[in-house]
């Protein structure tokens, strides 16, 4: 039986299909060439819209109203200007064409060779911590796929990791502090030493986010901060950790910085502060900064255990009741402070019982600042005298209702020498200078969320107010103005904040010779028109006085 020939359409169908595909490809290329400007402008408009959305998301909520007003003003000016809409449309199309060009495309996805090797090394280092022999499908295995464990990553200009999201198996003990500390230490070592890393653990999603923190600004010097009475600026921290900013002046520039504000007074939950650090870490600078801020609304008693004259600039100033650096003077000043606290408590209690407001002399803040009080412990023991720290028990326990605040600064290795009332009642804590994670946790009561580094500038550390979060802290530069190593700008900034000088005895302004008056006559006995006040029931309270220049 002879075969019948195939239909013609089937015999040459492949050639027709090839010609059809070629015609379709040619038509598509022609359409792309014709519509290329429109495609470029559309791509550019999409990128401009994405940039605008990012800019809007990054703008703080309190500044969005001003931004909307500015945009509305620009649109109104463009609409009212001659040929304004036409020029605006041309400008927008030009910007979109520039943004949509092929050269403006994003960088190629995926890391380069050096970055890939760094990620592979980090993955292999995590295998012993995130894998077990019983896991049938381990996420971490030697020679495994690192891209499944690191879904998101970013590098800085030096090919070092700046952002990383790490996935880990559900059986990892992420609730144990020791296990988390081991992972954080490993990631910090493998990602690059000398930088501070912030770790965010997502226990529900089994993910760890690692971010590199930028260094805190060190150019903020002592100045008058915009604060309410009873608020003390300890320093400045990261903008993501606090919800408040303060205007600060840095040289000729003025900007907003996020502060760590310590609130004192009647409503304070952390009425007293303890600052610890190594020598040269900036604890004395912190005390000077607190003293200059406290003198705006209160009185200050300073105990200098270092004996180096760090607070000589405050001697004889208005509001400075005493600057003591000897054991006898320290004991007398602290004894007076304890009696003054008791007197204020008695006066305030009587006023409350009588239904009257507290007297004015009990509402004026009294600050007791002690720098290295443990230095007097050995001196008091050798001289068989009372330890000055024992006199702080009354101000620490009962000082908050009568506006008495105690601030203690000492060296980090002398914490065990501090008395129990000092360690128990100082719930606002500051650690300055280089310190290990264990030392920071022992002082603050909670571990820091960043990795401490070995080399930090003076005044750099951590702060925690009560049971709040741990903040990175940079104390404003407040050096000793009489030190030869102090820069002229810093010296002048501190001198401008000092109160005027007064007589050491009673704090009144020293009269000039031309204004001096003759000696006052004896005060006459009170008459009937001037009733004699009733004697107080409390025991007489010693009054703190300071020697006059003639007595010195």
Image: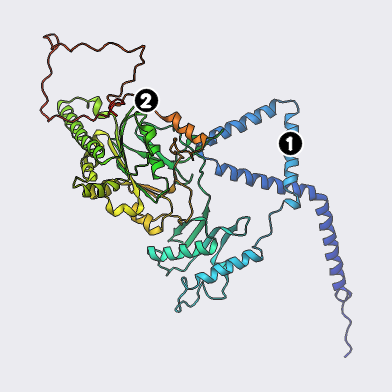
Q: Residue at x 27, y 10 (%)?
A: 518
Report the quarter where the C terminus lies: top left
Residue 14 lies in quadrant: bottom right
Label 2 sits on residue: 501
Q: In the displayed structure, does residue 480 sit left or right of residue 548?
A: right
* Residue 264 higher or lower than 143, as above or below: above
**As drawn, is 111 to the left or to the right of 374?**
right
Q: Nearer the viewer, residue 30 or 428?
A: 428
What percent of the width, then of the height, locates residue 207? Answer: 48, 62
Characterize the local packing of mark 2: few (<14), some (14-19) or many (20 or more) Cα atoms within 10 angstroms: some
Q: Position of residue 69 (x, y in %)?
A: 58, 31
Count the marks: how many? 2
Alpha-carbon span between mark 1 and mark 2: 66 Å
Q: Is residue 395 left or right of residue 460?
A: left
For the question of whether residue 487 can be seen, the reply is yes
Q: Quadrant where the N terminus lies?
A: bottom right
Q: Nearer the viewer, residue 367 or 225?
A: 367
Q: Is residue 130 above or below residue 496?
A: below
Q: Residue at x 62, y 64 (%)?
A: 115
Q: Quadrant of residue 360?
A: top left
Q: Nearer the viewer, residue 445 or 281?
A: 281
In the image, taking residue 103 as reference, residue 122 lies left or right, namely left
Instruction: Determine which of the numbered discs, if any, sits on residue 226 in the image.
Output: none
Q: Is residue 307 above or below residue 540?
A: below
Rendering coords of residue 462 (x, y %): 41, 49
Which residue: 26% across, 39% down? Answer: 330
Q: Nearer the viewer, residue 388 or 253?
A: 388
Mark 1 nearby-residue class (10 Å; few <14, some 14–19, many ≥20): few
Could you say where residue 28 lies in the image, as x and y percent from the top left? 81, 57
Foreground mark, 1 or 2, reads 2
Residue on which disc 1 sits: 89
């Amino acid at each position: 039986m002879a075969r019948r020939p195939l239909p013609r359409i089937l015999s040459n169908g492949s050639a027709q299909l090839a010609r059809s595909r070629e015609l379709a490809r040619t038509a598509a290329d022609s359409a792309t060439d014709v519509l290329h400007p429109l495609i470029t402008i559309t791509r550019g408009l999409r990128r401009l819209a994405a940039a605008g959305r990012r800019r809007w998301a990054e703008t703080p909520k309190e500044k969005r109203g001003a931004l909307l007003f500015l945009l509305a003003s620009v649109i109104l000016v463009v609409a009212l200007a001659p040929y304004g809409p036409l020029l605006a449309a041309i400008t927008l199309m030009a910007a979109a064409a520039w943004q949509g060009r092929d050269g403006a495309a994003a960088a190629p996805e995926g890391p380069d060779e050096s970055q890939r090797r760094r990620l592979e090394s980090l993955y292999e280092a995590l295998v012993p911590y995130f894998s077990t022999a019983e896991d049938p499908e381990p996420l971490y295995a030697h020679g495994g796929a690192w891209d499944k464990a690191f879904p998101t990553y970013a590098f800085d200009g030096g090919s070092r990791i700046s952002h990383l999201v790490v996935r880990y198996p559900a059986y990892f003990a992420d609730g144990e502090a020791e296990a988390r500390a081991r992972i954080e230490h490993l990631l910090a070592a493998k990602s690059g030493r000398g930088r501070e890393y912030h770790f965010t653990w997502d226990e529900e999603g089994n993910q760890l986010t690692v971010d590199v923190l930028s260094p805190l600004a060190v150019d903020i010097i002592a100045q008058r901060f915009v604060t309410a009475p009873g608020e003390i600026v300890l320093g400045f921290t990261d903008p993501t950790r606090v919800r408040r900013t303060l205007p600060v002046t840095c040289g000729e520039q003025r900007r907003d910085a996020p502060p760590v504000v310590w609130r004192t007074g009647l409503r304070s939950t952390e009425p007293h502060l303890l600052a610890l650090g190594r020598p040269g870490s900036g604890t004395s600078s912190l005390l000077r900064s607190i003293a200059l801020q406290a003198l705006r609304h209160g009185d200050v008693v300073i105990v200098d255990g270092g004996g180096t004259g760090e607070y000589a600039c405050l001697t004889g100033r208005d509001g400075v009741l005493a600057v003591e650096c000897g054991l006898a003077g320290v004991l007398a000043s602290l004894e007076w402070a304890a009696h003054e606290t008791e007197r204020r408590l008695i006066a305030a209690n009587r006023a409350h019982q009588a239904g009257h407001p507290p007297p004015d002399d009990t509402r004026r803040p009294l600050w007791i600042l002690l720098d290295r009080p443990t230095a007097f412990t050995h001196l008091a023991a050798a001289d068989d005298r009372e330890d000055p720290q024992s006199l702080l028990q009354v101000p620490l326990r009962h000082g908050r209702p009568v506006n008495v605040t105690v601030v203690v600064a000492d060296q980090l290795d002398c914490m065990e020498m501090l008395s129990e009332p000092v360690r128990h009642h100082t719930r606002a804590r500051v650690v300055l200078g280089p310190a290990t994670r264990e030392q920071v946790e022992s002082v603050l009561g909670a571990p820091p969320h960043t990795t401490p580094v070995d080399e930090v500038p003076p005044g750099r550390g951590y702060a925690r107010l009560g049971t709040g979060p741990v903040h990175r802290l940079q104390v404003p530069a407040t050096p000793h103005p009489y030190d030869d190593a102090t820069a002229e700008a810093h010296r002048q900034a501190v001198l401008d904040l000092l109160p005027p000088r007064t007589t050491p005895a009673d704090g009144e302004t020293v009269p000039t010779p031309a204004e001096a008056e003759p000696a006052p006559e004896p005060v006459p006995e009170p008459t009937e028109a001037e009733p004699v006040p009733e004697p107080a029931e409390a025991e007489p309270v010693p009054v703190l006085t300071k020697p006059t220049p003639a007595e010195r």
